[in-house]
Amino acid sequence: MSYCVHCGVELAQGEKVCPLCNTKVYDPNGPDSNEKIKSSFPKKIENPELQIERKYGTLLMTLLLSIPVLLSIICDLLSSQHLSWSLYVCTGIAYFWILAILPHYFEKSNPYLITILDTVATVIVLMFVAMISGNVNWFLPLALPLSLLGGLIAMAIIFQCNIKKKSKVYIIGNMMFIMGVGIVLVEVIIRHYLQDSFKLNWSLYAAVSFAVQGIIFHIVDKSTALKERIRKKLFL
Amino acid sequence: MENKFWVKLDNAGKIYPAARSRRWMQMFRISVTLNEDIDTELLALAQKRTLKRLPTFSCSLKKGLFWYYLDHSEKTSSPEEDVKNPMVRMKLSKDNPFLFRIRYYNKHVAIEVFHVLTDGKGALIFLMTMIREYLQLRYGENIPTNSFILSCDDTPTKDELADKFLEIARKATLSRKEKPAYHVKGTPVEKHWLSIINGTIPTDKLAAKAKEYGVSISIFIASLMILSIQEIQQKDHSPRKRKTTIKISIPVDLRNIYKTNTIRNFSSYVNIGINSALGRFSFEEILVQMKHAAGMEITEKNLNAKVSQNVSTERSIFIRPIPLVIKTKIMKMIFNMQGTRYNSSTLSNLGVIKLPEEMEKYITHIDCQGGAPNRNSSICACISYLGETTISFSSVIKETEFERFFFTSLIKMGIPVKIESNRR
């Protein structure tokens, strides 16, 4: 047994310094430093990752975002006696809230549900902008189909990402094909809005580029040797 | 469909969910040391059986519209490996909703409890009942039961599950308001760390010294704590702080007074100490002051009035309909404004533990610790078993002046102290 020369207390086996005064323990007859001593305290240390609670974080962000909303409404009302420009601010912030904050509220968020929600929010925001700007002609033929198309492309990409048995290269290849089809559909919608002919122009260049990249990714996916060569050359 | 077991939080437990923060919750720990390494499979089985016997422990904390409540959980809880930094705030989740955890390491088994579930006596009942079950499984020993060692073959009684605060509350109340107490300050320890210093001393020598001064062991320890804090207070730079009262909060188990064996929270407290504005107190003066203050405060009438005050708040028709979201904020504010503001430290004495011979031969040591204090820097818990009293200080500051003065004072009185710590 060892005693602290400073405090006079007996120290438990294994104490290298006195816990009360930090004086180094010196005991020539004490156990060898290599000897294994069973301490009452384990060596394992619990270090929980301190995460911001999802719900708390989203509520806090909501509260913070409500400040510019309230301020812009007050300023707008004070300056013009009715709501005008502040509506854009409120709509923009509400849109940002749905896109960036709301998904964090749910512990296990469903990406499809979030995409649907984001698409609907986009449609509503654009409709709102069309309504307050007084020009709604572009909404139905252009904004609505483009928003829905964006949502569909996002869902197709999510579906691809969730394929478990396929490699990342294969999934990226498929994404390229999806993007190629998507870009063609974008031009179709725009030409329809402009009441132009349906002869495809710029989107074809992009679509071909996406298709070529898709094919390359699929070839790489199939060839293990090629994949290895690329990995060898490009590793970081 | 079978109705799930659920209970309202007891009156004392109501404050703890509201008072907790992201890094802190009110916890405490009791651990026993057996004479051989723990068989973890048997321990898990013993825990499972004990959970059936004491159903409030298999509950999770749920939110109602107006109050929190304990709801039976179908999840299973298994003992987990012990760690060097005990009582880290529990991360309550759907997968791990329990408000306590059993930990093991070599020969040690410990229970760590969120105070919302029960107090020290309730946790001791759970731990001892589980250890009895473990020893029966391990050695086939037939261990007799008593007030804190229950049989897992019995069914829970109404008395065990009752919120006794509501039953004993009367009309006479006492205000919670007191003078703020002095708080020892220091350099905070690392995040998620609780510095534990266990001092083991011979119970007979401690009891003899307390008897020499004509006080109980609790009052003796509390007085020595005050003397130690006074030493630090006198060095404080602030003249105002040097004159602030030093008070120790001593929890009082109400089970003996009201003859019950409830497993829920059922204790009150007294904050007693010295008024430093009157000058420096000698140890003898502190002992006299504490002895008489305890005599005045620890009476059935006084303790009941304190409990009744809390119960009347809970029953108030103005408080009850407030939604929980708002109520939680108010309760947290009250906890911060009152709570530990009125004491400089806490002394929880679980008393002398006497086990049946059939159990005693397997258990070599028992100790207990309070969890990280909220406002104070260091709190104390003690328990006596097999002729040894373990006085444990749980601290959230790096400085050890308080503990050092306390233990070296015992040495100077001729009481040997053996120190063990998790400090690094």
Image: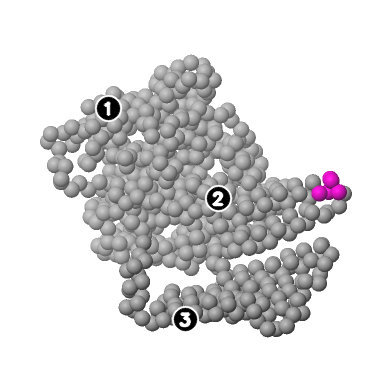
Displayed quadrant of residue B128 = bottom left
Spot occupied by residue B95 in the image (x, y as percentages of width and height): 47, 64
Q: Which residues are magenta?
A: A76-80
Is A79 covered by the magenta stretch?
Answer: yes
Q: Which mark is residue A215?
A: 3
Instruction: Label the magenta part by its dominant secondary structure.
Output: helix
Name the kind of residue labelled 1 in the image.
Answer: Cys
Dots 1 and 2 on the same chain:
no
Spot occupied by residue B327 in the image (x, y as percentages of width and height): 65, 49
Residue ID for mark 1: A7
- The alpha-carbon separation of the residues under discs 1 and 2 comes to 40 Å
Question: Dot 2 surroundings within 10 Å: few (below 14), some, or many (20 or more)?
Answer: many
Front of the two marks 2 and 3: 3
Read off the chain for label 3. Answer: A
- The alpha-carbon separation of the residues under discs 2 and 3 comes to 58 Å
Question: Dot 3 surroundings within 10 Å: few (below 14), some, or many (20 or more)?
Answer: some
**Is residue B368 visible in the rendered structure shown here?**
yes
Residue ID for mark 2: B17
